[in-house]
Amino acid sequence: MKRTYLGEFEEMVLLMVAILDQEAYGVTVNQALEEHTGRIVAFGTVHNTLIRLEEKGFVNSKLGGATAERGGRRKRLFQVTALGSRTLQEMHELRQDLWQMVPPHTLRLSRL
Amino acid sequence: MNKQSSPPRWAQKMLAWFHPEDTLEEVEGDLEELYGYWYQRHGKTPAVLRYLFSVISVLPPFVRKRKHEKDYYTPSKFSPDMIRNYLKVALRNLIRNKTYSALNIGGLATGMAVAMMIGLWIYDELSFNKHHENYDRIAKVMQGATVNGDFGAGEYMPLPLATILKTDFAADFSHVVLSSWTQEHIIAHGEKKFTKKGNFMSPDAPEMFTLKMVRGSREGLKDVSTVLLSESVSQTLFGEDDPLGKIVKIDNKLNVKVTGVYEDLPYNSDFHEMTFIAPWDLYLLSEPWIKNNGGWENNSWQILAQISPASDFEAVSNKIRDLRRINVPETAYMKPVIFLQPMSRWHLYGEWDKSGNPEGRIQYVWLFGIIGVFVLLLACINFMNLSTARSEKRAKEVGIRKAVGSFRSQLISQFFSESLLMVAIAFVLSLVLVLAMLPLFNEVADKQLSFPWKEPLFWASGLSFSLLTGIVSGSYPAIYLSSFQAVKVLKGTFRAGRFASVPRQALVVMQFTVSVTLIIGTLVVFRQIQHAKNRPVGYERNGLITVGMNTPELFGVYNPLRGELLKTGAVVEMSTSSSPATRLGSQQIGFEWEGKDPAFKEQFGIVAISHDFGKTVGWQFLEGRDFSRSFSTDSSGVVINETAVKYMGLKDPVGKIIKWNGRPLKILGVIRDMVMSSPFSPVYQTVFIIDYGWAGVINLRLNPEMSSSESLSRVETVFRKFNPGSPFDYKFTDQQYALKFAAEERIGTLASVFAALAVFISCLGLFGLASFMAEQRTKEMGVRKVLGASVFNLWALLSKDFVMLVMIAFMIATPVAWYLLDNWLQKYEYRTGISWWIFILSGAGTLLITLLTVSFQSIKAALMNPVKSLRSE
């Protein structure tokens, strides 16, 4: 595989950023993770992952949107890059292809 | 946000402290927002707990640092462009402020040159004798004793000790070498005759000293009639010819064969004066009296030894410690000890104080080391002072640099590179200075130092020391200047605070404290020398010469020689004596006198003279009379000095009898004390006896009405007749006497040079500061002048501050100098007091110099036309 490796948690965070559209920053990503996956995540983990994603070039960020409820401090807003969205799509397609290959009865068996 | 819903303060602080700066703002915001969210959903305690947990999760080491984004190009601190820029700005600054630069660099270069020369001097002192390969294993055998409570040690050894060391302690010693003293001998080959210094030594000596043989071998002294010559003596006697196998005559009586030529010993060896070595057995042959007088009682020679590789000095010293007490039990009362003095201690720890602690030149090594450090410190202080004083002028530059994006670290490195540049220039300049001054320094310090071009240690220490100086002296300006706030500086509201000049003033006080201490020190050293020079010596030095009696021809011809000499008219009086008037050669025990306490262990200096000695040297009688040929009984008479009378506690000494080894001697007269040994110590109790056979020198009183060159040539003809085999060598007594001050004068001269340099460097700094002050207060002076202040007023105003500083320095220096010098003077038994006027004088002198330095600037400022100074903006 030529593309950069994307871990499971990283993929989740990246997806959250995509879901949140223009509104992704530390707080919202954290809340969305909690809401959609039910996982309780340490803030530091999200923070570190976002930074790592940015280093890998899947997201980019800019500072902006100071609001009174954060004491006038700016947020760092994240956005999925072209590389990020292509990677997400590729992963999605790969998964779908793989799903296609799964014989129906195995899953049914495992459901029992 | 109300107070209830804000997270704990300390946690916020912790976050702010430890979280990486780059992401702090967003993380703080995020966490605060999250806290509000948790607070609303779950209540306070869970919110606080989650907040704390989150804070910890974003603290190091858990947090990931954001890599810097290259928003704009940041030049590296050490990029070539920036360094070029720093250098350019530094050079422009140097050139624009020529006076400052000259003062700064000149002062630093002088300081460094002084430190370097002192460093070379100390290195030379510490590396004394290191030339010998067996440096670590060679020692002098010494003996010490405690008489009447005072410890004394000497290197005059008896012969039997050498035999015992060689036989009974063979396992401890690789070599035991007996040696005569390095004395003048006449050495002749054919018509060529020279007086050269040399030793008689056991055949092991060349091996022990690891002499580098140019010709022949170190085995050369195995035969009795041989000699090893130093290269320089071989040159003078034989030129380029091969000297091996040639016959040389020593003292006109000993014919010896040259069996080797060794490379001259370096100047910083204790044996550098030894220009030839003859075998010890030859010495015994030529001095037959030793055969019957070579016992334990005769301490006349030197024993050198090299310990075997397995033993160490201390262990061997302990083994041989009691040899004298065992062999001569009757000396036990003086607690005699025999010990080894390792070669590494010969030069620097050659003396002992009365309680037996070693001392010696090491104290001068310390003294000069401290002076060197201080002079260098003064130079560094100057540098710092001038740079900080100038800093306000460069505040604008710092402001602009900061405004266009300099980091503080860049500014710091800029100022460091600037100070390093200055130091580099100063270093090169100081090398030039050292090269230029070294010959002069060698002469004053009696050294043969050369510039150590090839010594990596020198370069390493020189460069690291420059680097250190650059960093130390550049640190204050670098850190101070870079702390300026760009906004304030550029708005023009920047003013150094009221106390900004306090450190500068403290440094000036320190400089002058050192300078004043050095001045006082120099004055006291010279006073002490003068004090000893003014001491009445008890005889007439001028026009007195001595000629050594080192050949057999001069013995037994007293009367004919005297007659011939007087006949020439060049000599008004002539006599012989066992030692010259400038040296007390012999000290003896075995005296008894009326009323002597039997427990008292006496010792007297003794000089054997001829009847005419008194008239020759011109001694002065307090009581009694001189020896006279008219009374035949005078040959068992004695003349004693004033101190001897006090020493024996005699009343009406003339006519009393004292006994020396049972031989009665009648006191004929008492003379005023003659200073024969060190002029700094008290006169020794001395007796003068008549003995024509015990003669070491001929004393001649030259005719004062004849020029000395004329007299000397006439005297020479007489000596040529009586002693044809020897060159005519003579010594002027006044010169010999002056040599006694050589060590002290050398210290005095060096100290005064260093003191002068210290004052000079301090003044350079003061001059720079004063000119800076004057410049800074130009406007103020203008206003004052317009309002009617006189030139004198202004001068006083500007000079006042500096005078205050110097006064404070003087107040600190006085007790320090007093304490140090009082300690130093304790070393001398004949010493001057430290009078108050010395302090007043040096204080006034410093003040005068300060005023002169400052006045040049302050008067210039005071005379300035106020129109000009007020108009300039």
Image (spheres, coloured by chain):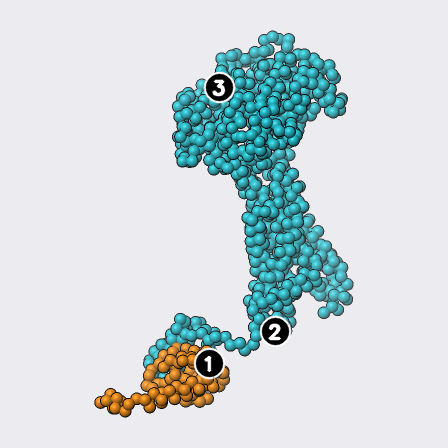
Chain colours: A orange, B cyan
Read off the residue under disc 1. A57
- Compared with B637, B122 (above or below) is below
Amino acid of disc 2: Val
Instruction: Name the front one of labels 2 and 1.
Output: 1
C-alpha gap between disc 2 and disc 3: 91 Å
Could you tell me which residue is drawn at 44 percent across and 23 percent down?
A: B163
C-alpha gap between disc 3 and disc 1: 101 Å
C-alpha gap between disc 2 and disc 1: 32 Å
Q: Are both tags, 2 and 3, on one chain?
A: yes
B403 or B435: nearer the eye? Answer: B435
Read off the residue under disc 3. B294
Label 1 environment density (alpha carbons within 10 Å; few <14, some 14–19, many ≥20):
some
Could you tell me which residue is drawn at 23 percent across and 89 percent down?
A: A109
Say whether residue B714 is left or right of residue B672: right
Is the Cβ of the residue at disc 3 closer than 8 Å to that at disc 1? no
What is the quadrant of residue A103 in the picture? bottom left
B793 or B553: nearer the eye? Answer: B553
In the rendering, at what x and y percent does residue B315 appear? 40, 34
- SS for callout 3: loop
The mark nearer the N terminus, 2 or 3, is: 3
- SS for callout 1: loop
Identify the subunit bearing mark 2.
Answer: B
- Compared with B586, A63 (above or below) is below
Label 2 environment density (alpha carbons within 10 Å; few <14, some 14–19, many ≥20):
few
Could you tell me which residue is drawn at 60 percent across and 8 percent down?
A: B632
Q: Which image quarter holds the N terminus of chain B? A: bottom left
Read off the residue under disc 2. B404
Amino acid of disc 1: Gly
Amino acid of disc 3: Gly
The disc placed on residue B154 is: none
- SS for callout 2: loop
